[in-house]
Image: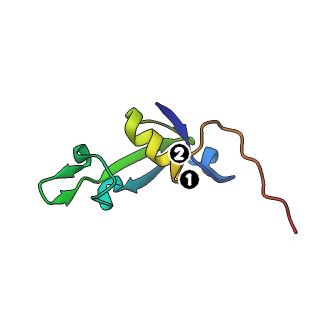
Amino acid sequence: MKIYATGFRAFETARVHVYVTPGARRESDPVEWWVGETPRMYDVEFNYGAAEVPDELGKYMLDHGMAGRSKVVIPRAVA
């Protein structure tokens, strides 16, 4: 699955590493994200704002706001 970094300057940077530990909540996360008694950590490397990750990890990052589905960055409204 292809995901995109969030933030305005993410697409200007050659490489950005994001470390993700999706198995931190043992009761609700899949057992594939555990190695024995330790949650597995993933190093996601964004190249100019885009990264290719396994589908489960991509869905996790999208659901938790760590990445976006497209390159489009929509600024928040200023109050």
Secondary element at tag 1: loop
| Residue placed under numbered mark 2 in the picture | 62
- Left or right, residue 59 beside residue 39: right
- Left or right, residue 50 beside residue 55: right
Extreme residue toward the left, this view: 36
Which x, y percent locates residue 51? 48, 37
Residue type beneath disc 2? Leu
Q: Which mark is residue 18?
A: none
- Pick the front one: 9 or 34: 34
Instruction: Classify 10 Å Cα crowding around label 1: few (below 14), some (14-19), many (20 and above).
Output: few
Q: Residue at x 28, y 46 (%)?
A: 30
- Left or right, residue 29 beside residue 53: left
Which x, y percent locates residue 59? 46, 40
Q: Residue at x 48, y 47 (%)?
A: 61
Q: Which mark is residue 65?
A: 1
Which x, y percent locates residue 64? 51, 53
The number of callouts visible is: 2
Extreme residue toward the front, this view: 27
Asked whether disc 2 touches disc 1, contact meaning CB atoms under 8 Å apart, the reply is yes
Vertical order, 15 against 27 (above or below):
above
- Pick the front one: 79 or 50: 79
Residue type beneath disc 1? Gly
- Pick the front one: 33 or 71: 33
